[in-house]
Amino acid sequence: MVDAIPPVRGRCGAPRRRPEAVQTDRGYRSHRKRIGMWIRNIEPIIPDKDAPHGSGLGVTRWVIERTISWLHLFRRLRIRYERTAEIHQAFLSLGCILICFRKLKPLLC
């Protein structure tokens, strides 16, 4: 799955093919997965088995999980009714536009 990540935008020049770091849950904590990330020059950020919950990893992951939960407020994205990926992608884009508009509306008015 990591090998299928598209190029990452950044500085001028050749785009990075992989991210610098990947965050995962405790469930992905295995020596084999850690080695696979290091071989690809990706730093794995995986909490230890004994680390308490709220040890800092959720500070950045919360933004992604919050956005996904906002997208699930739209019924057509929560339950996929469309048969084609293009139509689902269009509704996903509309959902993202509405979320951005709602967040930026106080700044624009």
Image: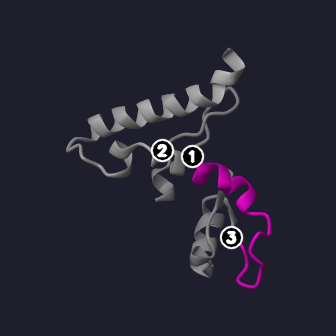
**Numbered marks: total:** 3
Residue located beneath label 1 in the image: 67
* Dot 2: element: helix
Residue located beneath label 3 in the image: 46
Above-or-below relation of 46 to 109: below
* Dot 3: element: loop
* Dot 1: element: helix
Left or right for 83, reference 52:
left
Q: Nearer the viewer, residue 35 or 77?
A: 77
Identify the residue at image location x=27%, y=35%.
87
**Nearer the N terminus, badge 1 or badge 3?**
3
Quadrant of the image for the C terminus?
Answer: top right
Residue located beneath label 2 in the image: 71
Identify the residue at image location x=46%, y=46%.
73
On whether residue 16 falls in the magenta region, the answer is no
Q: What amino acid type should be assigned to the residue bearing mark 3?
A: Ile
Q: Position of residue 49 (x, y in %)?
A: 70, 83
Q: What amino acid type should be assigned to the residue bearing mark 1?
A: Thr
Q: What amino acid type should be assigned to the residue bearing mark 2?
A: Leu
User: Spatial distance from mark 1 to mark 2, Cα to Cα?
Assistant: 6 Å
Q: Position of residue 58 (x, y in %)?
A: 71, 61
